[in-house]
Amino acid sequence: MSFLNNGRNRLGNRVISSLLVALFLLAAPAVDGKYGKLADGSLVALASSTSDKKKAAQEGLSDVQQEIEDIRDHQNEVAGQMDDTEEKLTRLFAQQEELKVRISDTQARVDQANLDLAAAEQKRDEEYESMKLRIQFMYENNTDDSFWTAILESDGISDMLNRIEYISDVYQSDRELMDAYEQSVQKVEELMAQLAAEMDELYGLQESFLGQQAELEELMASLSAQSQKYAKQLAEAEQMAESYKQTIAKAEEEERRRQQEAEAERRRQEQLAQQQQQQQQQQNSTGTEEPSEDPGYTSNISGQEVVNYALQFVGNPYVWGGNSLTKGCDCSGFVNLVFAHFGISMPRYSMAFANVGKSVSRSNIKAGDIVVYEPIGGVGHVAIYIGNGCIVEAQSSKAGITSYRSVDCRKITAIRRVL
């Protein structure tokens, strides 16, 4: 069984390693970029970006898949041993049934031999008693006078010879009968001794079968327990593999989202550059400056209503890709869900917010306006302005949803009004 223990130890070590990787992935901060901010506002690289998580998850998945194959190999090996042990038990049970029949048959022969011995002994004893009576009679009447008298009184030589022969025949017949009965008794006793030895051998074989059965049943119990442990390890490994797959899928979705946002930002920058070029051309031709942007409100929802609703969720967790204001969401999800509460449809990607509603100049920003920031590491950020130079935002997995940062915490690329 040592190979099973060694296999279990190796699999246990792999499970522990995989769990450590999984804990690392779960504990890693889910942020919209590769950088975070220190207290002084300086940027620092984060150890676990989306690409790092994806790579770690792919490595973990590869290890777990190999572990799953190893577990299944061990399961097949144990299953084969269980089949072999079960086959041995089946053969052993058949042998035990045959042995029971042999014991039963031999016991019947022993019982019959006992009856035969009793009958032989009884017959011998009866004949012995009869012989004793004849011997006694002949002894009492076998005097010399009577013997000679019997000869002399015979009716001739033939009668005399007959009488002498009769007396000899009686003695000889009794001896032969007694010898025959003694031989019968001896043969039955020899048969009983042979049957007793055979019964001892059969009972010894039965005891050996019972010992083999106990060993095989103990082995089957051990193999069954090992099979159950492997089944549990396999379930845990498959669950872990599924967790890695989900992490990889989320990372790939995040990469696609970043690519979409980057492409959207590129197009927006191109449009902005064209607009600035056109405006510059107009200014050069007219000699006037561009008026500040402060579009009017077109809905009956005030910016303060939006701010008051958003501030209810400060302190709740940040969850990348999340869609719950209470259980967790990311920056774009937060803004999307807040405005959805008022029936206003918003994008799901941070950089796409640069094209919603109407543009607002920095000098005319008001509560309820959406602030879009320049991407860092290919990942953008979006928040809601609450007044007094601050924003409410789903900041990071470490900070959660906050309302203390300055609207100028990062470079602003757009301010949009959708109310």
Image: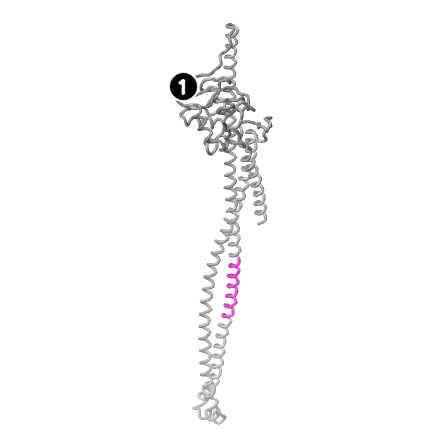
Residue beneath the point at 52% across and 54% down: 218
Residue 321 percent location from the top left of the image: 48, 30
Q: Main SS type for the magenta part?
A: helix
Q: Which residue is label 1 attached to?
A: 298
Residue at 45 percent of width and 69 percent of height? 111
Q: Amino acid at mark 1?
A: Thr
Residue range in magenta is: 191-211
**Does residue 398 lie above or below 353 as drawn?**
below
Local packing at callout 1 (Cα closer than 10 Å; few below 14, some 14-19, many 20+) is few
Q: Position of residue 323 (x, y in %)?
A: 46, 30
Q: Is residue 270 above or below residue 305?
A: above
Coordinates of residue 93 in the picture (x, y in percent): 47, 56
In depth, the one of 127 and 3 nearer the eye is 3
In this view, the residue in front, 136 or 231, is 231
Pick the residue in front: 179 or 102: 102
As for residue 206 lying within the magenta part, the answer is yes
Q: Is residue 237 above or below residue 341?
A: below
Residue depicted at 44% across the width and 25% down the height: 304
